[in-house]
Each structure stands twice: as structure tokens, then as C-alpha cells.
Amino acid sequence: MRKAAMAAVLEKKLLTYDDITALPEGQYEIIDGVRKDTTPTGGVHSKLEYQISRLLGDHYGAAYHILVGEVGILIKKSPLRVRAADIACISKEKMNNVPLGILETAPALVVEIVSESNAHWELTDKVKDYFAIGVERVVVVDPITATVNVYQRGAKEILFHGFDDDSEIAPGLKVRLSDILK
């Protein structure tokens, strides 16, 4: 029995950058060539994603693409690493047209909304990955603890807020998340 399981693992093909155009849509990330499925999100997660993306769209206007819904972002070609962001904001100066598939341009801002299935170390790894490709700001919204952590590229501190605080999720955009959950 153990021999058969080991053979199945050895036969499993690692995904490479050459596979990127053939990747199916779905809820997963690719970590070092291995597909890692994620679980569907819940109602509060969905509401936060919608409301925050709407506020970002109003704030940035036509100057940015506001992308939502597990947006695939290329982190590294080899070994292949693709992260799925809840919300990604990219300047139209940096990327004129939105690609049909995975983004290969680093967003200026990424918003991650924590789900019950997220481990703390996974979110830390995601923040590191986003900064490695040039993302300027990562906002981690945790509806479970009602907190918002704002990570700014190059800053030594993390800005920590509660849902009742005004959180600057984008430069010049302060939001009180408890208000948008009403």
C-alpha cells in the first residue's frame, strides 16, 4: 500500500511556467510547482471583498484596474509560484490592458481577507511573496479577529487596526470596516 502511494507522489508532475497558459480557472495557488487548492469563502469574506473593491474603485477612479476574486499573480517562474489575491490594484500606467490569464505585473496594492482555513504562516509567506515582486502595500483584513494589518514595502512596522478604527487601506483612503459590514 505504501509503495503505491509513493509511486503516485513520484508520478505527480510539477507545474512549470510553460503550463501557465493552460491552467484552469479555480481556487488554488501554485507553490513551487505544486497546486494547492483553497476552500471557498464565506459571506462576510465576500461582502468585505466587494465593499473594499468598490471603495478602491471610487478612490482610484479610472487610473487603476481593480481586480477581485482570487486573482492569479505570478511570483516566480521557476519553481513556479502563483498567488491568488482577493483584491489587486494595478495602475493603468503600469499595465494598460488586463490579461486574460495570470497577472505578470506586480500590483501596487493587494488586499487579502483571512478565511478560517488560513494559517498565520501562510499569510506571512504571501506578504513576503508580494513584496518580492514589487507590491507596495499589502492589507490583511481578518474578520475573525476584526483586525486590519497594513504592510508597507520598506517599512519596519506593521500598522495594526481594529474594525472600529479608521484604517488607511490605500494612500489617502481611510475606511472603518465596521461601517461597511452593517
Image: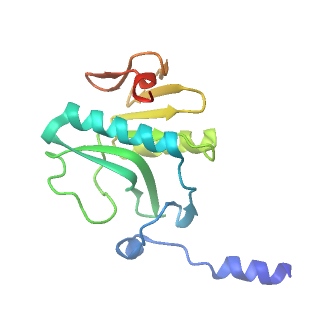
Outermost residue on the right side: it is: 1
> Across the whole image, how many numbered discs are drawn on residues?
0
Query: Taking 143 as reference, is 132 above or below it?
Result: below
Picture coordinates of residue 162 (x, y %)? 51, 19
Picture coordinates of residue 90 (x, y %)? 25, 44
Colour scheme: rainbow
The reply to whether residue 146 is in sight is yes
Picture coordinates of residue 73 (x, y %)? 37, 55
Query: Taking 42 as reference, is 152 above or below it?
Result: above
Q: Is 54 placed left or right of 17 in the picture? A: left
Q: Quadrant of residue 137?
A: top left
Q: As rendered, which of 23 and 133 lies closer to the eye? A: 23
| Residue visible at 43% across and 37% down in the picture | 48
Quadrant of the snapshot with the C terminus: top left
Q: As rendered, which of 171 and 86 lies closer to the eye? A: 86
The reply to whether residue 131 is in sight is no
Q: Is 17 placed left or right of 31 in the picture? A: left
| Residue visible at 51% across and 44% down in the picture | 43
Outermost residue on the front side: it is: 182
Q: As rendered, which of 133 and 123 lies closer to the eye? A: 123
| Residue visible at 21% across and 34% down in the picture | 58
Outermost residue on the top side: it is: 165
| Residue visible at 45% across and 30% down in the picture | 181
Query: Taking 158 as reference, is 102 above or below it?
Result: below
Q: Is 27 placed left or right of 121 in the picture? A: left
Quadrant of the snapshot with the N terminus: bottom right
